[in-house]
Image (tube, rainbow, N blue to C red):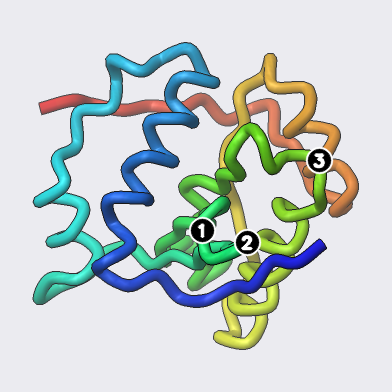
Amino acid sequence: MSLSIRKAVVEDCPRIMELVRELALYEKAPEQVTVTMEEVIEAGFGEHPVWEAFVGIHDGQIVGLSLFYIRYSTWKGRRLYLEDIIVTEEMRGKGYGKVLLDHTIAFAKEKGYSGMMWQVLDWNEPAIRFYKKYNTNFENEWLNVNINF
């Protein structure tokens, strides 16, 4: 296994969008990706960035992504919210997701955050099995709420 990890740069945004679209296909919701390239660039690299990411590179190609941001819990303080961890379909099963997640966890610990959180679809058994290897807690009582504008 040969995967190098580095912080995402603005030039990575087209490939990041490709990975996001691949994930949306896997999650059976490609029509829900409505974000533009301009928004991705501005939100990640503009005057007030709101997300950061690590990219996983194999043979010179970005094959994985860990995209996250910092959220604040009134009970726990600063926590890293993992928005997406993506490994291209052809590269799954090689341990690249583990390398990306381990790197992201180490980053959160280094920053002194109180923990990490993320969501997983209830039907995504491969991801659930993967996350259970980390002694994670799956919450049942919280419901997702959102509003679209």
Q: Which image quadrant: the N terminus? A: bottom right
Residue assigned mark 3: 93
Residue 110: where, in percent of width, then height?
Answer: 63, 87
Q: Nearer the viewer, mark 2 or mark 3?
A: 2
Q: Kindly report the distance in space between the C-alpha atoms of the residues bearing marks 3 and 1.
A: 17 Å
Q: What is the distance, in whole Å, between disc 1 and disc 2 at their CAs?
A: 5 Å
Q: Is residue 32 left or right of residue 3?
A: left
Do residues under tags 2 and 3 come within 8 Å of each other at their CB atoms?
Answer: no
Q: Which mark is residue 61?
A: 1
Residue at screen point 32% across, 43% down: 17
- Rendering coords of residue 131 (x, y %): 78, 43
Q: CA distance from mark 2 to mark 3?
A: 14 Å
**Taking 140 as reference, is 98 above or below it?**
below
Q: Nearer the viewer, residue 108 or 143?
A: 108
Q: Residues within 10 Å of mark 3 (few under 14, many from 20)?
A: few
Of the 4 image quadrants, the one containing the C terminus is top left
Query: What label does residue 58 carry, if any?
Result: 2
Mark 2 lies on a secondary structure that is strand
Q: Looking at numbered disc 1 in the image, what kind of residue is underneath it? A: Gln
- Considering depth in this image, is 119 or 31 the residue closer to the camera? 31
Name the residue: 15% across, 73% down.
48
The three-letter code of the residue at mark 3 reads Gly
x and y, in percent, of residue 40 in the image: 21, 52
Mark found first going from the N terminus, 3 or 1: 1
Pointers 1 and 2 in contact (C-beta within 8 Å): yes
The disc labelled 2 sits on which kind of residue?
Answer: His
